[in-house]
Amino acid sequence: MFVVILRYLKPIEAVEAKTAEHRAWLEQHVQSGLLVATGPMVPRTGGVLLARGGGTREALVALLRDDPFQVHGIADYEVIEFAPGKYHPAMAEFL
């Protein structure tokens, strides 16, 4: 499983200008099952993506290059891979 931390590099006005594009990109990956949860940080200084396991870090990093926030230099990304040791049974299919 992966946690992706996005940190905004540009002012919030630049973020908001590309948010609809970014959310459309997210939606296709939520629908495909790759992304389990996504959302902005509170306060809104970036965002968090929770991606299912089973793939490689390299494949996820390559996919993130197509996110409009990365394409337009809006955010940088930190990809953290982790192996859940304890989890709610409903999460089993995403690990």
Image: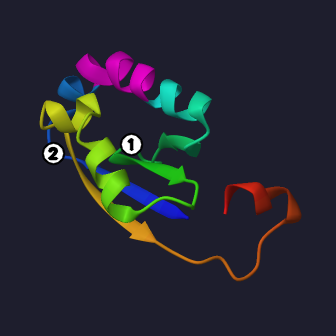
Q: Residue furthest bottom?
A: 85
Q: Identify the residue at image location x=34%, y=46%.
A: 46
Q: Identify the residue at image location x=29%, y=34%.
A: 67
Which of the two residues, 1 or 6, is positioned nearer the viewer here?
Answer: 1
For residue 17: magenta?
Answer: yes
For residue 72: magenta?
Answer: no
Residue that badge 2 annotates: 9
Give coordinates of residue 6: x percent, y percent. 32, 50
Describe the element under mark 2 as helix, strand or loop: loop
The image quarter containing residue 16 is top left
Where does the magenta region start and end?
A: 16-25
Residue that badge 1 annotates: 44
Give coordinates of residue 65: x percent, y percent. 23, 41
> In the image, 84: left or right of 81?
right
Name the residue type under label 1: Arg
The image quarter containing residue 15 is top left
> In the image, 14: left or right of 44?
left
